[in-house]
Image (tube, rainbow, N blue to C red):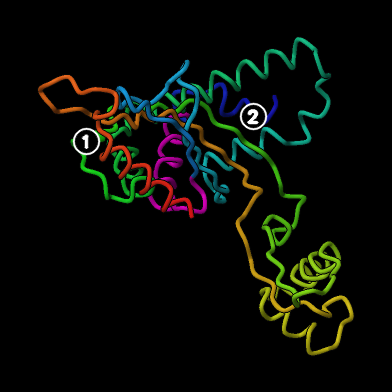
């Protein structure tokens, strides 16, 4: 039996555990670097455009060893699946079984961990700066989960590097990045140490390079997609006009979200 079916055939046991692991990671690790969002608030109604509840908030992270999530990820990319022919009935069944398992995880997260999800979204996305009565976050749905395997890619190659150069000079950015990442992989040293050593050694590749800064991680194994209702509640008794409705409140919320993204 394929290793992945250890989990797929025991969905009631493993799906809740995997859901719990993801929520705990979300609560503990979500920040401006690994959570993103994109949504539009209708200024006339204060409501979020929610066409077919498309995901509008995204959280990415990597698995931890000895977790159900890590076991599922590894099993999905195990060599014992390599013999399954593309387009075959076996592949169709596997994909459907995986889909059902992940949807179960999504349902458990949505139904059993709403308070933890909302509290984290309010803290990380809204920065605890928006009144709960104004933006109650009444609906949070975990829409889907994507799993990827990047074990063949060195950790140092999963991050963006920002290269500072001498004004008016030319550098080969690709060569600089390759040099830094290769040295990191071979020595385990951090970027600052590698940069300092290579500059002092007079490596011609580093000529005119003034700084190398570690940027955002762009390859993550797990992606969680949410639909979150960021709608603004109107507590005025009278019906406001399009120009009046929640203008200041919406402006404040939008400015706060823009500040969080910087």
Q: Is residue 29 magenta?
A: yes
Bounds of the magenta segment: 15-35
Tag 1 residue: 134
Single out the mark in the foreground, 2 or 1: 1
Q: Quadrant of the N terminus?
A: top right
Residue at x 25% of width, y 28% of height: 245
Q: Looking at the picture, how far across and down is residue 225, in whole percent?
A: 50, 32
Crowding around mark 1 (Cα neighbors within 10 Å: few <14, some 14 to 19, many 20+) is some
Tag 2 residue: 4
Q: Is residue 184 magenta?
A: no
Residue nearer the viewer, 36 or 13: 36
Looking at the image, the residue that sits furthest to the top is 89
Q: Quadrant of residue 228?
A: top left
Q: What is the secondary structure assignment of the residue under circle 2?
A: loop
Magenta residues, dominant SS class = helix
Residue at x 29% of width, y 23% of height: 242
Q: Disc 2 to disc 1, how far (Cα)?
A: 45 Å
Q: Is residue 67 depicted above or below 183 in this figure?
A: above
Earlier along the polypeptide chain: callout 2 or callout 1? 2
Q: What is the secondary structure assignment of the residue under circle 1?
A: loop
Q: Looking at the picture, how far across and down is residue 213, in whole percent?
A: 65, 70
Q: Quadrant of residue 2?
A: top right
Residue nearer the viewer, 156 or 51: 51
Q: Is residue 189 depicted above or below 57 in this figure?
A: below
Q: How many marks?
A: 2
Q: Looking at the picture, how far across and down is residue 73, in whole percent?
A: 62, 38
**Mark identifier at residue 218:** none
Crowding around mark 2 (Cα neighbors within 10 Å: few <14, some 14 to 19, many 20+) is many
Q: Is residue 213 left or right of residue 202?
A: left
Q: Looking at the picture, how far across and down is residue 15, in whole percent?
A: 47, 29
Q: Is residue 214 depicted above or below 211 in this figure?
A: above
Looking at the image, the residue that sits furthest to the left is 237
């Amino acid at each position: 039996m394929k290793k992945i079916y250890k989990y797929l055939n025991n969905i009631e046991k493993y799906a809740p555990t995997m859901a719990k692991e993801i929520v705990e990671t979300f609560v503990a690790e979500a920040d401006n670097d690994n959570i993103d969002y994109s949504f539009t608030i209708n200024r006339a109604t204060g409501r979020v455009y929610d066409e077919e509840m498309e995901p509008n908030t995204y959280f990415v992270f990597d698995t931890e060893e000895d977790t159900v999530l890590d076991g599922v990820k590894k099993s999905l990319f195990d060599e014992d699946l390599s013999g399954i022919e593309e387009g075959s009935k076996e592949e169709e069944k596997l994909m459907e079984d995986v889909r059902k398992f992940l949807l179960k995880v999504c349902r458990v997260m949505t139904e059993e961990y709403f308070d933890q999800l909302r509290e984290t979204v309010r803290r990380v996305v809204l920065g605890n700066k928006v009144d709960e009565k104004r933006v109650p976050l009444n609906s949070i749905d975990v829409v889907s989960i994507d799993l990827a395997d990047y074990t063949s890619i060195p950790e140092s190659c999963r991050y963006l590097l920002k290269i500072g150069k001498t004004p008016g000079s030319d550098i080969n950015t690709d060569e600089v990045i390759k040099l830094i990442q290769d040295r990191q992989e071979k020595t385990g040293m951090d970027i600052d140490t590698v940069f300092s050593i290579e500059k002092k050694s007079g490596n011609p590749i580093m000529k005119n390079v003034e700084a190398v800064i570690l940027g955002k991680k762009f390859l993550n194994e797990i992606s969680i997609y949410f639909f979150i209702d960021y709608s603004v509640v109107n507590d005025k008794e009278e019906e406001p006009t399009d120009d009046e409705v929640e203008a200041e409140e919406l402006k404040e919320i939008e400015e706060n979200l823009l500040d969080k993204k910087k």
